[in-house]
């Protein structure tokens, strides 16, 4: 208990400092990822299966032509591999949904790319004479917070790590501390009985008031 009493302030300071470090790392040390998403489905206009149209459109919307169109309009720099990962075909309530999730360093850039992408989808279908039209399921909105890193999560993890480090340090100090603080310590350390103790008069009160 003496070890804890003598070191608890250090443990609190370390915990707080680690929490602040986690917050600073998340806020300023790591690259931010803002994600703007939009969803569409493809409706056939020539009597063929909309499911087949959606699968074909998913390929067209991930095509190099679509990638070039996005880059030419925005003059941004990201690889085709990144672009390919941003477009996916999902099943929702029996309908093939094409989902575009644009991960960019700023919220405005993510939204701008997502809006441009959706505006180009019908043009791509028309260019390929696909016999289909685009229906918007959900339009992208500008993200208010980054998807990564989560500042509160990093701060919490930092605080937990700080607490664990402090607890480990206190345990090590306690295990290495061989100071004799009581008669029980003498008995445990040297295996000899204690015949008597001197009372600490500074901490005792005489019941007679003397």
Image (tube, rainbow, N blue to C red):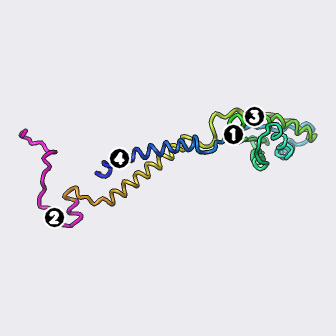
Which residue is found at the position 51% from the left and 44% from the top?
21
Left or right of 207 on screen, residue 138: right
Whole-number angstrom distance, CA of label 1 to CA of label 3: 11 Å
In what element is the residue under mark 3?
A: helix
Q: Identify the residue position indicated by label 2 in the image.
A: 193
In what element is the residue under mark 4?
A: helix
User: Considering only order in the chain, which callout, 4 or 1, is on the residue closer to the N terminus?
Assistant: 4
Q: Identify the residue position indicated by label 1 in the image.
A: 35
Left or right of 116 on screen, residue 144: left
Q: Identify the residue position indicated by label 4 in the image.
A: 8
Q: Name the magenta segment's main secondary structure.
A: loop
Q: Mark 1, residues whose alpha carbon is within 10 Å: few (<14), some, or many (≥20)?
A: many
Q: Where, by quadrant of the figure, is residue 138 drawn?
A: top right
Which residue is found at the position 20% from the left and 67% from the top?
191
In what element is the residue under mark 2?
A: loop
* CB within 8 Å, label 1 to label 3: no
The percent coordinates of residue 27 (x first, y second) are: 57, 40
Q: Where, by quadrant of the figure, is residue 66 drawn?
A: top right
In what element is the residue under mark 1?
A: strand
Between 131 and 112, the one lying in front of the other is 112
The percent coordinates of residue 65 (x first, y second) are: 87, 44
In front of the other: label 1 or label 4?
Answer: 4
Q: Mark 3, residues whose alpha carbon is within 10 Å: few (<14), some, or many (≥20)?
A: some
Span colored in magenta: 185-210
Q: Identify the residue position indicated by label 3 in the image.
A: 112
């Amino acid at each position: 208990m003496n070890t804890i009493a003598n070191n608890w302030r250090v443990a609190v300071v370390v915990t707080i400092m680690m929490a602040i470090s986690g917050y600073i790392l998340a806020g300023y040390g790591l690259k931010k990822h803002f994600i703007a998403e939009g969803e569409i489905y493809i409706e056939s206009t020539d009597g063929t299966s909309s499911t087949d149209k959606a699968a074909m459109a998913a390929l067209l919307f991930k095509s190099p032509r679509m990638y070039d169109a996005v880059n030419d309009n925005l003059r941004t720099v990201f690889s085709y591999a990144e672009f390919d990962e941003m477009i996916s075909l999902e099943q929702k309530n029996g309908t093939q949904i094409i989902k575009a999730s644009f991960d960019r360093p700023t919220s405005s850039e993510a939204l701008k790319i997502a809006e441009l992408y959706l505006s180009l989808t019908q043009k791509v279908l028309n260019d390929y004479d696909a016999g289909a039209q685009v229906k918007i399921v959900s339009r992208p909105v500008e993200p208010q917070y980054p998807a990564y890193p989560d500042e509160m999560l990093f701060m919490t993890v930092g605080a937990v790590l700080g607490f664990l480090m402090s607890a480990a340090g206190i345990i090590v100090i306690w295990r290495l501390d061989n100071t004799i603080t009581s008669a029980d310590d003498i008995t445990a350390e040297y295996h000899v009985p204690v015949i008597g103790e001197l009372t600490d008069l500074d901490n005792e009160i005489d019941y007679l008031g003397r």
